[in-house]
Image (tube, rainbow, N blue to C red):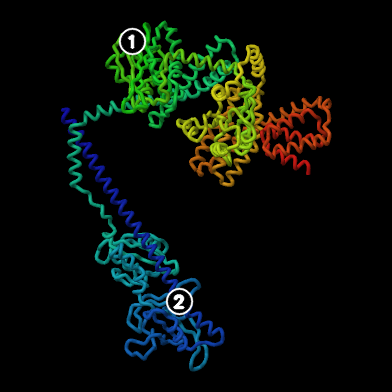
Amino acid sequence: MKKTLIIVIDLVIMTLILFFIVQYANAKMRESNKSVTEAFEKMTVTAEQIITNYLEDEQHLCDVWANYINRSAEAGTPMTAEEAISFIRKAKISPIIYGHLIFTDEGSRSGISTHPGSKDPDDYSVSYRNIKIFDNMDKTVRQDGAVSLTRAYTNPQNGVQSIAFMNPVTIKDEDTGELKEALLMRVEPVSTLEDKLVFLKGEYENVEISLINNDGEYLVHGKSLKNSNFFEYYKSYNKADIADYNEMIDKVTSQTGTMTMFNSKGEKCVISYTPLKSMDTWLLLAYIPAVELKSTNTVVDWLLLGMVTLGLLLLLGFNYLILAQYNRKLAEAAEAANQANEAKSHFLSTMSHDIRTPMNAILGLNEMVLRDSHEDEIVAYSESIRTAGKTLLGLINDILDFSKIEAGKMDIINVDYSLASMLNDLVNMVQGRADDKGLSFNLDVDRNIPSVLNGDEIRIKQVITNILSNAVKYTKEGGITFKAGFEKIKEEPDKIRLIISISDTGIGIKPEDMKRLFKAFERIEESKNRNIEGTGLGMSIAQSFLKMMGSHIEVESEYGKGSTFSFALEQGVKDWNPIGDYEESFKRSVSERKKYKERFTAPDARLLVVDDTPVNLSVFKNLLKRTKVQIDTAGSGDQGIMRYRNRHYDVIFLDHMMPDKDGIETLKEMKEIADTTNAGTPIVCLTANAISGMREMYINAGFDDYITKPIDPDRLEALLLTYLPKDKIVEASNEDSEDKGADDHDTDDHDIPDFIKKIDALNVNSGIIHCGSCEAYMDTLKTYLGSGKKNADEIQKYWADKDVKNTTIKVHALKSTSYVIGAQKLGDFAARLEKAGEAGDVDILEKEIEPLLTQYRELVDKLEPLAYEYSAKAQNGTKDAKDKPLISDDDMKEAYERLQEACNSYDYDSVADIVSKLEEYRFPEDEAARFEAIRSAVDNFDYDQIPQILTEKTN
């Protein structure tokens, strides 16, 4: 019974499929036939256009003949019949075209021809007495804009089937001299018209073209349409009542369309019809046998249907149940996959919004604690917070990139990194959690591992973090052992194989669960370990990263006793000096950093900083304010070269991306200067490029080192400790340190206005960290505001001039200054356009440069209250200005002259000194505005404006 049922079901399914195939084939056939018929109708319209053009052109030539003859009559010099025919003989082009002049006032309908008759070569007379092509000779007057054409008839001169174009003319009677009317005819063979449609034979072999009037009478007659009247022909061979017959006539005489009818042989044919635009009463008919229009793909391949039937029987007979079972499993799997994807999307969105934002705030505030605290215990706590926080933030970022891993868009970025620092970050993160659970944490690090390696530190750290975190989470008692070793690679002497192994005494993994270990969103023994935090992504991400780096995780586990996770990874070696005791090494580096951070000063040292962006110069000076280092600034490469010639510096910082002359070009010119005291001065590159390989590029270009922007204060002071002369580094006393701490306390209590905190585009905490203090941050914001309008206008001007290079450099400067003040979104936008400019992608710049400037100007507008605040403070500060001495005219003139000379020689230190001394004096009311403009230019490092201000005022 079951077999019978299955067979019946199979046969029903097969029958339905075959029925569908036949119906589909028939539908396709009908669709194809319809398309062919529509194409035939379009061909008819095309033929009508060709015929219309031909008729109008030929009628126009007949009109030219007639107009010439009639104008002669109008001018008082009418032509005789012989003269008119003589003119036409000269005017005609083709020998097959005849000109006939028929006298309309004679009942004989005779006249003169341009060609002799076929019987007598000397006889040029022509007669239309027996040719019934004129209903009434008096009605042959042609309407304006219409073609006046006869039906097809036999030319009496040569016996050829022809058509004639007509036009009335006025000529002179040779006998009486009186004017009389005549009919001018341009006679052409019907074959000329048929030749115009020869293209149809290429596509439709048996097509026939006919021309009829509204009464059905033929102008041009197709050979298959036997009767003298088309409508009578239709009525004779097609069954139709009077209503259908009249409807057919109405459609044919007024529309464009297609119909099917029977010919005289009883064969089905297709008639396509359309009116001639040039003749109100004539229609074009295209006739073709219906069989010729049928699509070639109209036959159902019954052999194919038989094979399909056989295949269906076999398939349905043997696989019906199996397919049903598989379909059920697939449906369940699809539902599970959808649920997993929804869970992943929800998780990623939650991580992005709810964790990243507070983590950035935590790290920013903790950085301020590190900068200001002088208690060793608090500093140690903050160091642990920073290490764990940065690691956690890195984990969050990597988890958010899980979709990139799935899409194959995650890149491995190799950089030089300190192994000791990386290991200590890992230990700091895990040690506390292990201690909280009462677990021992054992370390076994090979003392001979090279200290500096090259690889993707972030990815390696995440892999190890995932394994260590799992070891702590799934171990209730006992401990964890973290081993780090290496082995050299004989084939590649500049590389090692870093070997990491992590063992625990945890719950272990069952053999059957091993295959689920590296699957995304999978957690082993979920019900048993539901109280243990986790997403099920960690090991999947770790394995994916290692595969991208050419390695993989190996697992040895015994359920109930513990597990060992290990991997071996090739890494480049940048420093073969052994790591030694990495814990001791890290503590020493922290101690040194704390010492120079808190105690280092160098009041006798002098630096030169060259950067085209005033904000960057302001931030640089504020970051080193406590070191008491003397800092000279230059706003361009040329200004930097001038200072390089005239004064000795202990260290020079040179921005890479500057308009007109970039940092590398400036460095090259500096190196070419022979007579200078700066030949041995270290030159450090300021750059926003932090990708792997940039250090080598800058070193090869001639720089001694480089530092990235936004500038890390610790990194900056570390560079100074490296490159400043040791005899100029002064160790500050404890008292100085305490004073500094007090000053810093005052600084950090500096109030940030509420409107600044409410600006969504600004991350105030990030900006304070970059600038070093609240006060420095406020000064930097004022500088950013002061130069904002000018910078935006310069970007717009460079782009209007299609100067992609300088536009890119200015956008680069906007990126770095925006990052400094915490305008992350604007900085990211500028970074994207900077990359487009470097790649020469003009389309992106064209599309997005205006939106960038709009965001920039909107931020500057939101900062505008700072200008009012500054102005108010300046006014408050001048309440006691009356107590200052009034500057004399001579002293003021001398000071302005010295300012002009200092600007001309690019001696901007002298400019600042002169302005500082002038602030001790009170200026006359008509000079106060000028001095305020000069002081504002100095504050914004806009020294180029000072000569213009002086010139405008003195004139």
Q: Position of residue 740 (x, y in %)?
A: 65, 16
Q: Position of residue 356 (x, y in %)?
A: 50, 22
- Residue 510 shows up from this direction: yes
**Circle number at residue 61:** 2
- Residue 852 shows up from this direction: no
Farthest-out residue, bottom: 175
Q: Position of residue 419 (x, y in %)?
A: 43, 20
Farthest-out residue, front: 675
Q: Residue at image x 31%, y 28%?
A: 491
Element carrying mark 1: loop
Q: Residue at image x 29%, y 49%?
A: 28
**Quadrant in the picture for residue 442:** top left
**Quadrant in the picture for residue 605:** top right
The residue tagged 1 is 507
Q: Quadrant of the N terminus?
A: top left
Disc 2 to disc 1, C-alpha distance: 106 Å
- Of the pair 885 and 144, the residue shown nearer to us: 885
Q: Quadrant of the C terminus?
A: top right
Q: Nearer the viewer, mark 2 or mark 1?
A: 1
Q: Position of residue 166 (x, y in %)?
A: 44, 78
**CA neighbours of label 2 inside 10 A, class few (<14), some (14 to 19), many (20+):** some
Q: Please, what is the three-letter code of the amino acid marked with disc 2?
A: Leu
- Of the pair 126 and 694, the residue shown nearer to us: 694
Dot placed on the residue nearer the N-terminal end, 2 or 1: 2
**Circle number at residue 406:** none
Q: Please, what is the three-letter code of the amino acid marked with disc 1?
A: Ile
Element carrying mark 2: helix
Q: Residue at image x 29%, y 15%?
A: 556
